Each structure stands twice: as C-alpha cells, then as structure tokens.
Image: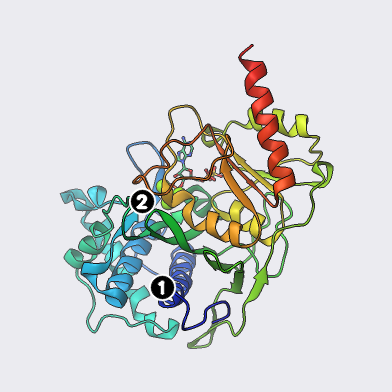
Amino acid sequence: MEGVDANDKYAKELEVGVRVVQLACRLCQKVQKGSIGPTPDQVFSKDDDSPVTVADWSVQAMISWILSESFGKQNVSIVAEEDTQALSDSNSTRLLASVVATVNESLAMAPRFGLKGPTTSLGPTQVLEAINHCNSTGGPIGKHWVLDPVDGTLGFVRGDQYAVALALIENGQVVVGVLGCPNYSSKKKLVNNSSVSKEGCVMYARKGSGEAWMQPLACEGGTHVVWPNSATRIRVSSIDDPSLATFCEPVEKANSNHSYSAGIAYTLGLRKQPLRVYSMVKYAAIARGDAEIYMKFAKAGYKEKIWDHAAGVVIVEEAGGVVTDAGGRPLDFSRGVYLEGLDRGIVTCSGAILHDKIIGAVYASWESSHL
Ligand SMILES: Nc1ncnc2c1ncn2[C@@H]1O[C@H](COP(=O)(O)OS(=O)(=O)O)[C@@H](OP(=O)(O)O)[C@H]1O
Ligand SMILES: [Mg+2]
Ligand SMILES: [Mg+2]
Ligand SMILES: [Mg+2]
C-alpha cells in the first residue's frame, strides 16, 4: 500500500486501519441504500438529543471485532463514541437484531477487503461485547485506538457529508489517522456545501512521515470488490493570501459560533462565503487543498471529544497543515476522552502564515470584546 513500508513502525496498524475503514464505508453506504439490515432508516435520539443510527453501532462493533481479531483482544484498547445503553433494554430487540444483521453482513465481506472475518456469524451478545469493548478512556500511556464510527451522523442521515474516523494514539500522540469519506469524491473538488459524490475516498497518514495519502473507495465489480490499485499523495493548498482563501466551519449553528468566525473572517479579509460541511470532512478538505482554513468555536462549556479530531489532525499535519487551539497550542490527546485544556476553539490552516493571522485576529477580538 502506498505510503506504508512493511518495515515502518505502525505498518500493520495502518494497513488494517485503511482496510477496515474501507469496509466501514461500504457498510454505511449499504445501510443508506437500504440494502443491508432490516430497518435501515431508523434514527434515534441520544440523551443530548444528538442522532444515532444502526450504522453508528454497526461500524463500531465491526471495527472493534476486526481490531481485536488482528491485534489480540487483550492488547486492544479502543476509545469510541457509542455505547450499548439504547440497545440493551427489552424494547430494543428489533433494533439490536438489525445491528447484529448489519454487522454480520459486513463481516461476511471482510475477506474481500483483505481482512479475516469470523467463521460463524456473531450473536447479539458478541456484538454488544464488541461495542462495549470500546470503553477505554485513553490517557497518556500506551496505545489506544480512537474511533468515531460515523462522524457527522446528521450529514449521514441527510444524505450529505459524513466520515468514518479511526486513529491510533501512542503515549498521548496521534501516530496514525485514517479518514473514510464516503461522499467526498477522490477526483472532484469540494466546491460548495452540497458537493456530494457517490465515489468517496479514504485518506491516511502516519505521524512524522511527512506524507498523507488518498485512495478511492473500493468499488463493486459484479460479485467482486475492486480494491483501489493506487493511492495519491495529498498536500495542503499553497494559498496564503486571506482574500483568496476558503474557510470551512460546521453546518450546525449549535456546534460552532458562526457569527464569531464571521467576525474573524471579516477582520482577516476573507472574501469567500464559508464552506459549511458536516463532520471531519472539513479536515479532509484542508488536507487535500480544497480549502485553506477550518475554524470551530463550540459554545462555552462544550468539551470537544478526541474522536472528533484525532484522525483529521494527523492527516492535515502530515499533508503540511497546522492545527492548534485558539491560543496557538497543539491539541492535547493525552488526557482521556476530552481535549482537556482546549483554549476556546480549534484553528486548522493550510500553512503557518494564515494560521498566525487567525490566532492574531482571535487574540485581538478577544481583547477588544473584554475592554
Ligand atoms: N453542541 C455541540 N457543540 C460542538 N460540537 C458538538 C455539539 N454536539 C455534538 N457535537 C460534535 O460535533 C460533531 C459533528 O461535527 P461538526 O462539529 O463538524 O458539526 S457539523 O456536523 O458540521 O454540524 C458530532 O459528531 P457525531 O456525533 O459523530 O456526528 C459531535 O461529536
Ligand atoms: Mg454522535
Ligand atoms: Mg463525531
Ligand atoms: Mg459519531
């Protein structure tokens, strides 16, 4: 696989990570088309009113099972978004059956993605166990996988952008990142808020390699899966003039302060309309050079979770970009489930010149708003 030398540290993790994210993207597409699992279109509400679907639970179970199979269950620590609370009560039998069927259909395809599947189908207990195995809280020591099975569930439900995000943290550093973007074409630029494609991509990077890669999604070739035979190196944009730069931000107003970022954009002389894109596809757009800036300023009191950023950060950095909090400090993945100590928000740029300007504008606006 391009960008992975068998002698590299993390070569196996990267190889398995890319294959399992490819398989997860296929699972999501099948759920969306209604061709896998008995109840594809159900959307449920979590305690915080955010949505969750059969795809979120099924991807988490499937990836957890494959990672345990590939690296040994006792060696695998996974920090991931979903839990089994809503699947475990007595009214959820049909929902759980739907997840179990989806996981099994997906695992049955594992060999076509170069992965070892189970010899017999998993039962509900094993599926719940696989989801629950992802209950690690990470931390500063050792290796931890970090998984967002479906990032941008709202985008997924609305047929828009979403991502499958898998990263590996070792001793508090993100060392591997894989980002599957089922609706982000490997060939076409993301030019507006509805650039949805049916021929997505998977991006990946290893920390310190100075390289980030993109391959198209594996596609259906009759009864076969046609595995991508090549990957392309991706690189951030070289634009450093704010008047030519494009900035991304979350779609949901509840997730980021749009008027604050509009103020920063105005101060900086950004001329273009913001590109509002669901999920970590925003990081993907920066890494590929389709946009130059990504700002997220969540409401005071909201704590960002590591699975919403880990994979995107290492891919952007290896593609040549810069990611920090609004105070200019690197994001800290070593302190558990949350990005503890994050200063106000996240600023991602294609290069240091734009990044310095944004941090300066944030500093100035904060000073003036506190006069
Ligand atoms: N209130 C609030 N503030 C900030 N962030 C929140 C909030 N609520 C949720 N989330 C997290 O945002 C993830 C969705 O990605 P984005 O932040 O890019 O938002 S958006 O989808 O573009 O609107 C989303 O990830 P998924 O749950 O995986 O979809 C959440 O983890
Ligand atoms: Mg969610
Ligand atoms: Mg998320
Ligand atoms: Mg999610």
SS at circle 1: helix
Q: Position of residue 342 (x, y in %)?
A: 48, 36
Q: Is residue 192 above or below residue 114?
A: above
Residue 211 visible within the image: yes
The image's colour scheme reads rainbow
Q: Position of residue 303 (x, y in %)?
A: 42, 36
Mark 1 near ligand 3 (CB under 8 Å)? no
Q: Which residue is mark 1?
A: 13
Taking depth in this image into account, of 150 and 27 the one nearest to the observer is 150
Q: Is residue 140 above or below residue 364?
A: below
Residue 60, picture quadrant: bottom left
Measured in 3D between alpha carbons, the distance from the residue under mark 1 to the one under mark 2, in whole angstroms, is 20 Å
Residue at image point 36% right, 44% down? 335
Q: Is residue 13 above or below residue 335?
A: below
Q: Nearer the viewer, mark 1 or mark 2?
A: 1
**Which quadrant would the C terminus be assigned to in this image?**
top right
Residue at image point 36% right, 51% down? 81
Q: Position of residue 293 (x, y in %)?
A: 68, 46
Taking depth in this image into account, of 323 and 290 the one nearest to the observer is 323
In screen coordinates, is 329 left or right of 356? left
